[in-house]
Amino acid sequence: MLKTTWKTEYKGHVIELENRVNLERLIVDGQEVARQPGATWEPRSFQATIPDGNRSMKVDANTRFSKSPRGLRFTVSVDGKEIYSEVKWPPRWYLPFVAAGLILTSVVLRLVGL
C-alpha cells in the first residue's frame, strides 16, 4: 500500500505518523493512540500522553499542507516544545504524473507507427 511514514524518537519513546489514503494514524511506542480519516491534504491534529518516570508528557502532532517546500509537513511537540518537523511528498501524489506520461508515450508511439 502506498503510505508515507514520519518517525522520530524522544527520550526513548518512538513517535510515528502513518499517512495512508484517507487515513492518518499516530503511533507511540508501537501502539496506535489516535487516527483520523479524511483526505491527505486536510490539516489534522493529534494529542497523546507518554510516561516519563513519575509524570506524563503531552505530545501534540500536527499535519498540514506545506507550500514551501511543497508536501505534507508533520510537526511534533512535547510539553509545548517542538522536537521534530519534516516535509515529505507522498509517493501516491506522483501517480497522476506517471499516468499522464504513459498516456503521452502511447499516443506518440501510435502516431509514429510503432
Image: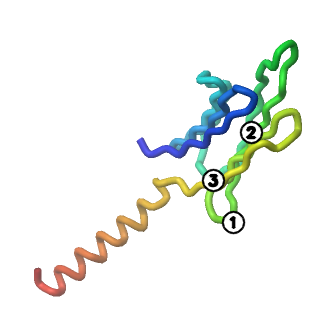
Q: Position of residue 7 (x, y in %)?
A: 62, 39
Q: Which residue is mark 2?
A: 61
- Give whichever of discs 2 and 1 has the lower sequence position: 2
Badge 2 amino acid: Ala
In the displayed structure image, the side of residue 68 where residue 49 appears, left or right: right
Q: Residues within 10 Å of mark 1 (few under 14, many from 20)?
A: few
Residue name at image x 30 percent, y 77 percent: 104
Of tags 3 and 1, which is closer to the observer?
A: 1
Q: Position of residue 55 (x, y in %)?
A: 87, 17
- Is 100 situated above or below 82? below
Residue name at image x 18 percent, y 80 percent: 109
- Is 100 situated above or below 109? above
Secondary structure beneath dot 3 equals loop
Mark seen at residue 76: none
> Of residues 23 and 57, which is closer to you in this image?
57
Gap in Å between the C-alphas at discs 3 and 1?
Answer: 11 Å
Q: Are marks 2 and 3 in contact (CB under 8 Å)?
A: no
- Give whichever of discs 3 and 1 has the lower sequence position: 3
Residue name at image x 17 percent, y 80 percent: 110
Instruction: Give the residue furthest to the bottom.
Output: 112
Q: Position of residue 58 (x, y in %)?
A: 83, 28
> Of residues 86 and 113, which is closer to you in this image?
86
Q: Which residue is mark 3?
A: 41
- Is 64 situated above or below 22? below
Of tags 2 and 3, which is closer to the observer?
A: 2
Secondary structure beneath dot 1 equals strand
Gap in Å between the C-alphas at discs 2 and 3?
Answer: 15 Å
Gap in Å between the C-alphas at discs 2 and 1?
Answer: 19 Å
Secondary structure beneath dot 2 equals strand
Q: Which residue is mark 1?
A: 67
